[in-house]
Amino acid sequence: MRKSFTVEQSWLCCIGCGHRTDLLEERKFHCPKCGGLYDIYHNFSLMGKTPGEHIEIFNKRTSLAAFHSDDPTIYSGVWRFKEWIMPFMPDNQIVSLNEGVVPIVKAGKNLLAWIGGDILLYIILEGMTPTGSFKDFGGTVMMSVAKAAGIKAVSCASTGDTSAMAAAYATAAGLKCVVILPKGKVTPAQLAQPLVHGAKVITLPGNFDDCMKVMQRLVEEYAVYPANSLNPARIEGHQATVFQIAQYFNWELPDWIVIPVGNGSNCSSVGKARRLMESFGFQKTFRILACQSEAANPLADSWHLSQEKDGSVLLEKWKSKYRPLEVGETSATAARIGDPVSRDKVMREIVLSHGAMETVSEHDLNKAVSICGKDGHFVCPQTGIALAGIRNAIRKGWIKKEEKIVVVSTATGLKFTETATTHLRDNIISAADCRTETVAKIMKL
Ligand SMILES: [Zn+2]
């Protein structure tokens, strides 16, 4: 069978030793020489267009998206940027669920007052996707590559959102899907999603890190195709976050992009897109502020331990300080990860962007969710981590007056209703009976 694209067009390269291999043939996703993660590279020079010409194409597609189209490069907010994401993928092999067209909104007055500081704050609401989380940005690309590679079944370990994405895109692609979840550690909504999409659901009596260990051995010893972010095709799609933000500001980048870190896929992709745009001649890029909760902060903790007197962090020192940790309890269950699989990429991108890491308290992340809700946006607890992280960073003077900041809201709060109602339960008033007069009295009418 003729391959969808060749190894001269797009290929895998180990981030540790530079070992190169075929994206469509690779099944283990760990370098056989040094055990490192892979990046995907594309030969952009084969496309015969300049980055400026690509931007014109992206803008034209975006303007056409309001009208009916069967072309995924128009209706998908990810494939609209195809030439910078997976340029050699044939259009007829794209597996899309119309993902990625998400709003970027100005932060409301309640959130701005709580965060404090005279900043320009925007939120990209990536929960407004087919499965309710940012994972769909990467899922569409990963499943298109899986199909192009002739894969019949995919699998993932998940804290909830990845399994929903994998199950939805697998069924759209006509592939089988098995998801491995920590028993009792995902929300009812997140458990329902893979079941509804027809995946096989296996729960393990452990935490996410236990599930990931099983998943990694299934990949290495049983050639199971991973939908987790160790599959670098995911990272290519998540880059659309940065391209959308750039396009929203007429192809200018903000000063900071702020993200919560679980396994690290978002941080890896935001950083990769930043470097790509830098290589295309963008003079001003952004710094990454990556945030974790107190319950699961192996990267933020080791980042702080590695800081020099001037605040900078050297990659090798950070790597030497990094330790996996046993996770504690947190309402931000999707980021409850003690040993992030993409940690090497996270460290690389934060150091290269002159970025920073921040740890936030459980109180603050939940407070951020309820404050954001008062502005009309119901975001997930992981978004709460990022919002609380901005507040801390302003107080430390890392984020300066009038800087432009975009925070990635990674999922809808509708996946986490139990958390929200638990924290706001005291606001519920129970009427003693069903009489209108009783309700009117409570309403002080
Ligand atoms: Zn290697």
Image (cartoon, grey):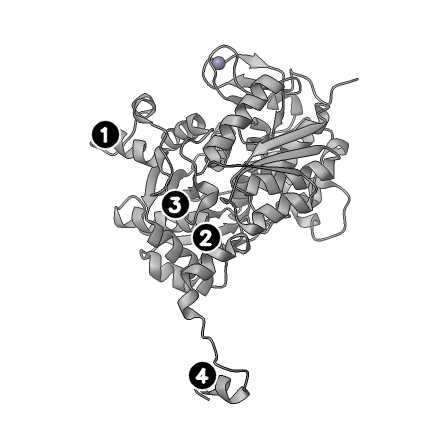
What x and y, as percent, mark residue 434? 55, 83
Residue furthest toward the left?
A: 309
What residue is disc 1 on?
Answer: 308
Question: Within the image, what quadrant is residue 157 found in?
Answer: top right
Badge 1 amino acid: Glu
What x and y, as percent, mark residue 32? 52, 12
Q: Nearer the viewer, mark 2 or mark 3?
A: 3
**Left or right: residue 150 compared with residue 399:** right
In the rendered structure, which disc, 1 or 3, sits on the residue that comes first in sequence?
1
Residue 402 seen in render: no
Badge 4 amino acid: Ile
In the rendered structure, which disc, 2 or 4, sits on the residue that comes first in sequence?
2
Badge 3 amino acid: Glu
In the rendered structure, which disc, 3 or 4, sits on the residue that comes first in sequence?
3
Residue closer to the observer: 346 or 298 = 298
Labelled pair 2, 3 in contact (Cβ < 8 Å): no
Q: Which mark is residue 442?
A: 4
Query: Label 2 crowding class (10 Å Cα cut-off): few <14, some 14-19, many 20+?
Result: some
What residue is disc 3 on?
Answer: 329
Q: Nearer the viewer, mark 2 or mark 1?
A: 1
Secondary element type, mark 4 = helix
Labelled pair 2, 1 in contact (Cβ < 8 Å): no
Cα gap from disc 2 to disc 1, whole angstroms: 31 Å
What x and y, as percent, mark residue 142? 63, 31
What residue is disc 2 on?
Answer: 122
Question: Within the image, what quadrant is residue 298 found in?
Answer: top left
